[in-house]
Structure formats: C-alpha cells, structure tokens
Image (cartoon, rainbow, N blue to C red):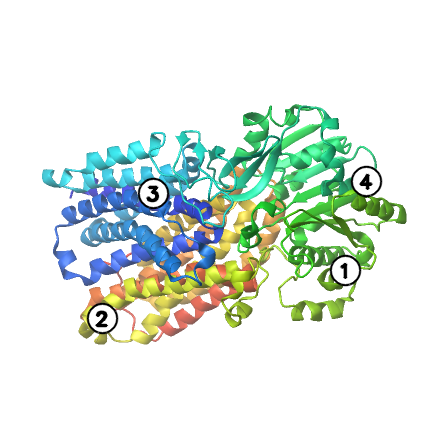
Amino acid sequence: MSRRSALVSIFLISLAAIVIEINYTRIFSFKLYYYFTYFIIGIALLGLGSGGALVSISARVRATDPSRLVAACCLAGSASVLVGYWIIALTPLSATELTLRPLELAKLLLLTLALFVPFLMVGVAIATILGTRTREFGRLYGADLVGAGLGCTLSVPLMASVSPPSGVMLAGLALAVASRFASTDPEGRRGWGLLAAIHLAAALLPGALPDVETDGNKSIADVPRMSRTGIRFGKLQRHFGRALFSQWSPVFRVDVTHVTSDTLLLHHDGQVGSALHRFDGDFDALPHLASDPRRLPFAVLPRGPRVLIIGAAGGHEVLASLYHGAEEVTGVELNPVTVSLVTDVYADYVGNLTQRERVSIVNAEGRSFLKKRDDRYDLIWLVAPDSYAAMNAATAGAYVLSESYLYTVEMIRESLAHLAPGGVLCAQFGEYDYENKPLRTTRYLATARAALRAAGVEPFARHVLVATASDQSGFQLSTVLLRRTPFGEAEVGRFLDGVASVRDGDARHPGDPPADGPVGAVISLAAAPLEDWLEAFPYDVSQVTDDSPFFWHFTRFRDVLRSPIRATVVDWEDSIGERVLLTLLVVASLVAAAMLLLPFAFVGREWRALPHKLPVTAYFAALGLGFMLLEISLIQMLTLFLGFPTYSLSVTLFSLLVFSGIGSLLSGRYAGRRNRALAALVALLLGLVLVYLVGLPVLVDRWISAPLGLRIAVTVALMAPLGLCLGAFLPLGLTSVASLSSHPREYVAWAWAVNGFFSVISSVLAALLAMSFGFQVVLIAAAAIYLLGVAAFARVPQPALAGAAESGPSV
C-alpha cells in the first residue's frame, strides 16, 4: 500500500465510522428511546478497541498482507453496514420489556452485534494502517483526525438533507471506496464497485430502504409510514391511519397520522407529541375550545394578552390563544420540520395560522429565544411533550432519561423575568395517574417553589393555581399557573369559573377541599418539613436544575435495584427507563468483557509474565472511565448551549477528536519525563474542570442567545485545551508499558483493552451518574479518577528512552 493509498484509506475509514456512529444515535432515538445514544457511543468504542486488540494479539492477523487485510476489512465493513441496517431496522424490540422477557434481551444482543461488526472492521483496518507504517504515523494520524472531523461536520447536514438511514448508507459507500484505495491487488479490488453502487442506490432511491420498526409501545409502531420518497415498510394499521407525512431531522423525526376528519396527530420520534386541527378561519366553528383546559390561563388574564408559546408544534395552543382573544401570539418551535408543517405542508389545513397579522412562528430553542428578546409577555406557555399522550400510555415513561432545560429552576426564573406586570407562566403536563402519583405536577411545583424562593417571592401558595381535566381514557391534563405577584380573589374566582366550564375539570389549588397529597405538600409545607417530605416520598420529585435537567426521572436507582421487576408490568410509569439504562449497563459490560478481555485467555502465558499489571490496569481503567465521564457530561451540559443533542454530540466529538489527536502527537516531546509530564497534565486537567464548573454556567447564560455559528466556535475553543490535555495521557502510558516487558505488543494490547472496556461501560455509566448526582459531580469524579490513575502509575518504572508506542491505537 502506497503512502497516498494509506492516507486516503484512513481518511475515508474514519469519516465513515463517525458518520455511522452519529447517524445511528438518531435512528435508535426513533426506534427505541433517546437514551440509547450513549449505548451507541459505547458499542462504537467497543468495536474500535476490539479491532486494535485483535491486531495486537493475533499473529495470524498480523501475518496477513496489510493492503489485503485493510481492503478486506473495508469491504466486510461496507457489507456489514448494509446487512446491519436491515437487521436493526426490521428487528422489533420492546425496550420496556428487556428485564421481563429473555427474547427481548436476545434481540438487543442481535442489534448490538449488527452495530458492532462495522466498527470492529474499522478498528482492525485503522490499527493495521497505523501499526505497519509507523514512520508516517504523524501524517496518517492527521488524515485520521481530518476524516473523523469531517464526518462530525457532515453528519447533521446529512440528517437534514437525506436522512439518518441514508447517511449510514453513504458511510458504507465510503468504506467500499476505501477498499479500492487500500488494495494493491487487482483481484482484491473486485466487488467494491458493486457494493458502492448498492449503497448509493439504497441511500438515494425512493423506497430502497426499509423504514425503522419502532418499539411496540410507541404510538407510531403500528402505522404504515410514508415519506417524501414514498411508502416504506411498516406494521399493519391498528391504532391510527396511514402516516400522511414522515421526515427525519437532526432534532427528532416527525410523522403525521390521520385521527378524525378534523384532527391530525404529530408523532415526535414515534411518540404522540402534538396535533394539527382543521381550521377554516371561523372561530365560531370551534366550540370545543370553550371547554378545553387550554382556556384556563386566559381566565386570569386581561383582554388581548400577548402570548409566547414555547413548544408550539402543531399550532393547537396558537389556535386556542386566538380563540380566547390574544392580541399577539408568538410560537417558538425547535424542530424545523414541525415548523414547516404549519407554515407550508399543512398551512391550508390549519387555516394559514402563521399568515395572520397577530401570529408569528419562530424556529428556535426556547431558552435561547428568551435570552435574545427584551419583550414582555402576559402569558408564557410551556407545552410539555407528554401533554398529548392520552393516546399512548407508554408515553408515561418515554422521556425518563431525556434532559430538558425547559422545566428547571433557571428556566422558570428566566420566564418570570420576561413577564409583563400581572403576567402568568403556564405549564401543562400529561398525568398518567394524578390521584395517586401526580409526579410531573408535583415536581414542577417543587421546582417553581425553589425558583420563586430564590427570587424572594413567598408564600408560594398565593402565587400558584392548579387544575386538572380528564378524558375518556382516564388520562389527565394538569395545568399549573405561576405569577410573581399573588393571585387576587377576583382572579381566583375567574379561574374557578374557568375550571367549572372545562370538561371533567377539577380545581386542585385552591380547591374545596384544599389540595392534599403530594401537590398539597409541595404547595403548603414549610421549608424544613418539605425537605423531609421530599426525601421520604417514594419518588424523586425534588427541584430540577440545569445541572441535572432530567425532569422525568422519578425513580431513584437505589429503589430500582430494591424493587421487584414485575412492578413494570402493571405500571408504565414506574422505573421503566431506569431499568432499561441499568440493563444497558450490564449488557455493555458483558459484551465488552467478552470482546476485549476474554481474548487474553488465549495468550495466558504472555499475560501472566507482564510486570506491574495492577498499577498499569488501574491507570488505563482510569483513562477509560475518566475520559468518557468528561465527554458524556460535557455533551449533555452543552446541549442547552447548542440547542439540541445532535449538535452537542457532533461538535463535542469533533473538538475532542481533533485536539486529543494533537495532544497525542505532542506527547512524544516529553515522553522521557513521564512522571513530571503526567503531574503537570493532571494539574492542568483539575484546573480545566474547575474552570468548567465555575465558568460554563456563566458562559451558557451570557452566550446562549448568540448565533449558532458563534456558539459552535465557542464550544470548539472550550474543548480545545481539554482535548490537548487528555490526548497526552494514553500515548505516555503506552510508551511506558511497551518498554516494561519482552512482550510489548501483548502489553500494549492489554492496556488498550482495559481502556476500551472501561470506556464502553462508562459511556452508559456517565448518564446514570449525571441523573443521580448532576453534571458537576460527574466532572469532579472524572478529574478525581484521573488523579488516582496517575498516582497509581507513578509506581511503574519510566521508559529509558523517549518515544511513542508503535502499535497502540490512540485516544
């Protein structure tokens, strides 16, 4: 393989791997749930690490001609991308039943294997190129980083312009082309053109790819779907009519289904998220809005209020605002696809709402929009994604592990600051079982009470109104109204009259009798008794902050481990998401152990002869744990700053990849002074973590309203010093272990396998820890883990000569 072929091959391979990883995070968010994002990251790391370990310990693999091996891996990887997508798309899996049915666990392992194989092939190919051309390591590693960086850059535009499944196919095309450049044998070049053509056709031709089968508990699961490229495969219709519209986006996928002649449902990543209502311009033809709970905030407002709706979606709340006399309505919606439905695709259906003089729809993130504006509103209306969930009971547990910065103490304070005198903040939630477990309402009230207390507003009971309304299914919509100034008797009276006019409406606070249970406790208890009550309550309904914005995470993990699994059978809302995350942690650990650690049983004699295994293992375990804890927590923290998770994932990965690579290359300059260098690096890391802890919240608050391009540039600048620092730890360690033994290749492989194992499990563990303790604690824990790892490694003899390990994969 020539130098040019090696450069082009590693560039295309790295580009393809990152595009596959990022696009599959979107596919699995739709197929299953958002929190599978971290599982995808773990499987990608597992495949890459397994490939590097395989090359290091397998004499048979190393004996294969490098050009032929790389070309074969690229072809096999390309083919496995194609086959793997079909398996992933068409294999039905119920994530909520993973702990209940062995068959579902077997399906998860099948999906894991389908994901794993392409990354394994990529890992073998990259390790072979880097390990056999050590004199050109700098240029090859640069091509590797440029390819990975370009993959991060292209992933979001690919999602928007074609689709995540098509993005995966184009990545498979890149692998097929890489095999053409890698092979020096004309015989070995056969097949790449056919594979490339198949991938291109699958990516671009209408109906070429099967649509993704979703979790059976999602509302879209039984709907035959239609996209802009034609009807795709899907299950037979049972609940809703055929999907009239389907389109992917980097935010979430949107499907539109027919319910009645006057109503269309919007499904966000497979879950009911909003509705489109037919409107011909005649408000007299909408008598149902007079008894709809969306009338409640207007009962306490003066005539002609200015309204801001965050989460405008299908425009239902816009229509309700106009019906109840709003003078001006501004709707903010994050997903551009959803915006296009009301402004273009179904504009006529909804009566061209957005063309009315008093109405504007803005494609933006809610917090960012508020920061940009100095306007004051009479009503700021937060529409929770589960407020339309009556049609789908499983929605009760769908958002458990999704972070949302719209229901935190900080967001409530920001909203209150944008209210006009006498203005009201309204939040509405779907409650699965309000009488026994009004968890969303209780948690939002606890958060609101903390926000108002921080602003010096007390007693809380005079600044809040609560009501519920039931539908025929028993699902209840809870309405919470908040205000900085107390509600007067006349306003309370109008509110109670409004509740009385709502179908099956029930005034909860103030009410007759007064609110009791969790809602009454959060509203009425004094501060100290309330803290005791929150700690004793069987569910976590404490205040939510930006540091741990998991509003729908109600079941503590310690309670999940203590409670019987059968509880999830009778209660959709009880710990389903938490159980799935714990199951993913176990599965990731077992698969990682089997793929990364078990192979060393076949080189047992060499492994037993390796010196200083305990401190070496501790060091590389610390690097794997610490790096991923930092990466995942920063991805989550920067979601608010960048607008949505896919941007945060791609920008953070890009930054850390590029600058960790540069840090790795620079580490050779001080490899001969290892302990001194590691001490300086860990001190720098501790300083950076301190800067992030103190400065990141301030930066987000002040810069969140900046243009997206500027926010991306700021993020890259923030990640650059961290990447330079983290990138040096691994090569310094590999240089040392390679000099410790007469089996340097096996020792490097062991170090890399340990690092990979702990990287895989920490990709899921990071989310679990963030939910339990917050992002700041996870950052501190990551820094402490690095410190402990470096302290352990200080006992390992330093290499006699400076240099870099020849065959070890980089961070």
Image location of residue 25, percent across then percent down: 42, 47
Which dot, 4 or 3, sits closer to the camera?
4
Between 240 and 138, the one nearer to me in the picture: 240
* Quarter of image, res 3: top left
Report which residue position mark 1 lands on. 523
Instruction: Kindly identify the residue that appears in the image at 60 percent across and 53 percent down.
Output: 697
Q: Which mark is residue 601?
A: 2
Q: Is residue 705 left or right of residue 616?
A: right
Q: CA distance from mark 4 to mark 3?
A: 56 Å
Sooner in the amino-acid sequence: mark 4 or mark 3: 3
Between 223 and 459, the one nearer to me in the picture: 223
For badge 3, the amino acid type reads Val
**Are the residues at dot 1 and dot 3 in contact (C-beta closer than 8 Å)?**
no
**Total count of labels:** 4
Sooner in the amino-acid sequence: mark 1 or mark 4: 4
* Quarter of image, res 39: bottom left
Q: Of helix, strand and loop, which one carries label 2?
A: helix
Whether residue 708 can be seen here? yes
Q: Which mark is residue 146?
A: 3
